[in-house]
Amino acid sequence: MSIVTDPARPIDVPDAADAPSERRGRRSGGGFNKITWQELVLRYVLLVFVLIITVGPFLWQLSTSLKGSGEDIYTRIPKLLPSEPTFDHYQAVADTIPVWDYAGNSLFVAALVVSGNVIGASLAGFALARLQYRGRKLVLGLFLATLILPGEVTIISQYVTVREFGLANTLFGVALPGMIGTLNVLLMYNAFRVVPQEIDQAAIVDGANVWQRFLYIGLPSVRGTLSVVAIFAFIGAWDDFLWPLIVLTDPDKYTLTVGLQYLSGTFSNNPRLIAAGTMIAFIPIVIVFGTLQRFFFKGVEEGAVKG
């Protein structure tokens, strides 16, 4: 079958360079991806509102801790920039309470909790996701069931257990209940679960045992989630107040959050010192998050295997 065309009639061939621009023009003329200026303004207004709610209290506490004694804090128009900046309040906090000893106790507890969660949650998550054994689904269901229990329900049984072990009034007793968190185990389970099974099968064919698969295949693939677990565990252990207050009776073993309550009671009329103590407790969290933040944001994309 042949197509006969008139040789005198020119054939309109669209220019290749004009085709993409024409398609772009059709796309930009409307559709779901078009953002109006009202929507753009609304987005920025919401972002600024969230920024004020989340960062505003931190900036206010930092500003209060740096303001001099003669500077008014409660002005009609709030001022974030102190007119007489000083670090004397931080020194006054250290002179009033053993803040650095309390910070060392909190750091010791946080190190135990982070180590326990990184190691224990990784092992438990790998066992739930990659190993086949009888009762695996039952164990996973029990982990899920414990998420509905608030911490206040089990705090009495936890204290009785710690006391029977002889760990009451010890820093290890403070760290023990949080050394393996249920949520962290489930996070690691989800991270290990998305790693392709073909990699494990190839490793088994090559003669790799369970520990080799865990160390050389599993852990390198879930570094992002490991950093998420480490950050959550550190923040939870560093900021915990109720449990250390119940377990510890010796003031020399107080963690920072418990020790700062004396600062609040002694200088309840001087919010500058309270703000300085709050900033001392907040600085380690910023350091930990700043160190691990590049791995933290990779945790949501966990599961990708690099070739």
Image (cartoon, rainbow, N blue to C red):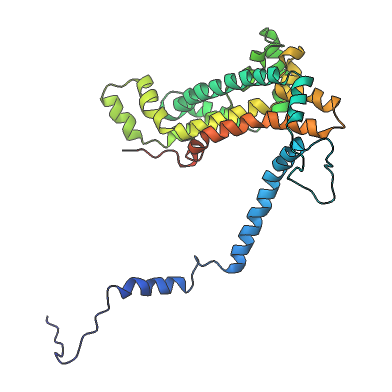
Q: Is residue 188 above or below residue 7?
A: above
View extreme (right): residue: 269
Camera-nearest residue between 172 and 200: 172
Where residue 28 appears, as percent x and y from the top left, is: 46, 71
Position of the C terminus by quadrant? top left
Q: Quadrant of residue 99?
A: top right
Q: Is residue 101 visible?
A: yes
- Specify the farthest residue to the front: 84
Q: Name the residue rendered at 19%, 91% in the picture.
A: 9
In the orientation shown, which residue stands out farthest toward the left?
Answer: 1
Q: Does residue 120 appear to the left or right of 193 in the view shown? A: right
Along the viewing direction, whichever of 184 and 252 lies nearer the viewer: 252
In this rendering, is residue 163 above or below 115?
above
User: Residue at 21% across / 85% down in the picture?
Assistant: 11
The percent coordinates of residue 119 (x first, y second) are: 50, 21
Residue 210 picture quarter: top left
The residue closer to the viewer here, 204 or 303, is 303
Determine the residue located farthest toward the bottom in the rendered image. 8
| Quadrant where the N terminus is found in the figure | bottom left
Any part of residue 242 in sight: no
Give the left or right position of residue 97, taking residue 147 as reference: right
Q: As drawn, is 115 to the left or to the right of 215? A: right
Residue 230 lies, in percent from the top left, at 54, 29
- Name the side, left or right, on which 227 lies relative to 263: left
Q: Quadrant of residue 232?
A: top right
Q: How many marks?
A: 0
